[in-house]
């Protein structure tokens, strides 16, 4: 894989992070509840951090991306994607976020599966690991808020 190919992969990943920021920002604008509005605005800030991390990699290309394989609770796979509504519950907000992270993780995993170039495949697998880590954070929050009896 050459520098241009690596750069194109990261540019695409950055665009995905920007799209996620817009999505969460649009959802935040629809929320009546101040807690949920702030929660979704927090998701916007988190996606902005991800964008900045990837932009840093574009500026100084490392040998490999520093994303490790993370545990996967697979909670998102058992939950449906809630409909965005101004009256959604906090558990639904986390469920929505974990489903979005699951989609991103699966997207990068699928891209890796279609790569014949070992370097490109590795980058996509590391991006999938980054999204898996985000998904894990949302799953933990979902379980904590959705099942407080487990505390």
Image (cartoon, rainbow, N blue to C red):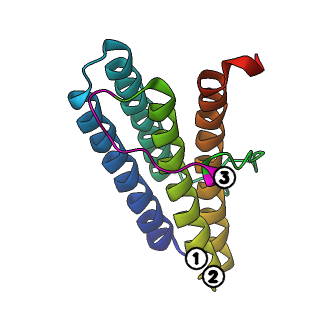
Residue name at image x 47 percent, y 73 percent: 5
Residue name at image x 67 percent, y 67 percent: 122
- 3 or 2: tag closer to the N-terminus: 2
Q: Nearer the viewer, mark 1 or mark 3?
A: 3
Using the image, tell me which numbered label, if any, was put on residue 117: 2
Using the image, tell me which numbered label, if any, was put on residue 1: 1
Circles 2 and 1: CB distance less than 8 Å? yes
- 1 or 3: tag closer to the N-terminus: 1
Q: Position of residue 69 (x, y in %)?
A: 76, 51
Is residue 52 found left or right of 106 in the rendered image?
A: left
Circles 1 and 3: CB distance less than 8 Å? no
Q: Residues within 10 Å of mark 2 (few under 14, many from 20)?
A: few
Between 75 and 133, the one nearer to me in the picture: 75
Mark 3 highlights which residue?
129
Q: Is residue 86 magenta?
A: yes
- Rounded to the nearest angstrom, the CA distance separating label 3 from label 2 is 18 Å
Q: Tally the marks.
A: 3
Main secondary structure type of the part rendered in magenta: loop
Figure quadrant of the C terminus: top right
- Rounded to the nearest angstrom, the CA distance separating label 1 from label 3 is 20 Å
Question: Which span of residues is magenta-colored?
Answer: 77-87
Figure quadrant of the N terminus: bottom right
Question: Which type of secondary structure does the marked residue at label 1 adopt?
Answer: loop
Using the image, tell me which numbered label, if any, was put on residue 47: none
């Amino acid at each position: 894989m050459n520098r241009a190919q690596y750069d194109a992969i990261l540019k695409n990943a950055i665009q995905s992070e920007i799209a996620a920021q817009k999505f969460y920002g649009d959802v935040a604008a629809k929320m009546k509840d101040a807690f949920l509005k702030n929660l979704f605005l927090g998701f916007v800030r988190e996606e902005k951090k991800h964008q900045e991390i990837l932009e840093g990699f574009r500026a100084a290309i490392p040998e490999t991306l520093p994303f490790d394989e993370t545990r996967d609770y697979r909670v998102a796979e058992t939950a449906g994607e809630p409909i965005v509504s101004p009256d959604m519950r906090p558990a639904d907000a986390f469920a929505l976020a974990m489903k979005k992270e699951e989609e991103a993780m699966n997207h990068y995993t699928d891209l890796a599966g279609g790569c014949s170039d070992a370097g490109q495949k590795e980058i996509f697998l590391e991006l999938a690991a980054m999204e898996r880590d985000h998904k894990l954070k949302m799953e933990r929050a979902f379980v904590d808020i959705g099942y407080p009896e487990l505390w």
